[in-house]
Image (cartoon, rainbow, N blue to C red):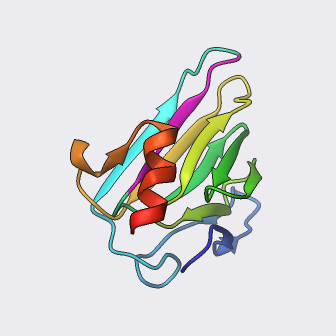
């Protein structure tokens, strides 16, 4: 089973401003089907709090910082994202929660699937049951 991991992205430094990019199947292990972003998160709020059966994600902090807590049902890991030249790959089947958003933070999420409510597991108890039967 694949595990969540930080993936470094290309970074081209230039006095006029730096440039980074992401290519599907080259920097991330999936075809990008959807892109969404999270912004204007009020202080103390938490985003996520769910798992996906099929969807894989790659999360980048384009601005500011935040933490992503990833849970496999046994072990929780916290990844701090605060640079735009790396991101967090999360395979399907992991519970995820985003927290500790700094002021003006901007998270971009690349998804391997189109939106499907049926792919979500929104209850942690159901997530643990799902892990037992898959």
In-front residue for pair 34/17: 34
Point out the image quarter for the C terminus. Answer: bottom left
Q: Residue at 43% across / 44% down in the picture?
A: 126
Relative height, residue 18 to residue 119 (above, below): below
Q: Which residues are magenta?
A: 44-52
Point out the image quarter for the N terminus. Answer: bottom right
Across and down, in percent, residue 108 comes to 50, 47
In-front residue for pair 76/19: 76
Q: Is 134 placed left or right of 98 in the picture?
A: left
Give the main secondary structure, helix, strand or loop, of the magenta stretch.
Answer: strand
In-front residue for pair 24/15: 24
When asked about the image quadrant of residue 117, the answer is: top left
Q: Is 64 placed left or right of 115 in the picture?
A: right
Across and down, in percent, residue 34 comes to 30, 55
Q: Is residue 87 magenta?
A: no
Relative height, residue 95 to residue 92 (above, below): above
């Amino acid at each position: 089973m694949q595990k969540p991991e930080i993936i470094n992205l290309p970074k081209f430094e230039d006095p006029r401003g730096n440039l980074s990019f992401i290519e599907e199947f080259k920097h991330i292990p999936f075809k990008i089907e959807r892109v969404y972003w999270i912004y204007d998160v009020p202080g103390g709020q938490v985003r996520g709090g769910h798992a996906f059966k099929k969807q894989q994600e790659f999360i980048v902090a384009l601005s500011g910082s935040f933490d992503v807590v990833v849970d496999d049902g046994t072990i929780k890991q916290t990844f701090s994202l605060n640079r735009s030249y790396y991101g967090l790959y999360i395979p399907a089947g992991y519970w995820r929660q985003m927290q500790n958003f700094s002021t003006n933070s901007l998270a971009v999420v690349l998804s391997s699937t189109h939106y499907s409510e049926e792919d979500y597991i929104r209850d942690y108890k159901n997530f643990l049951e799902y892990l037992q039967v898959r």
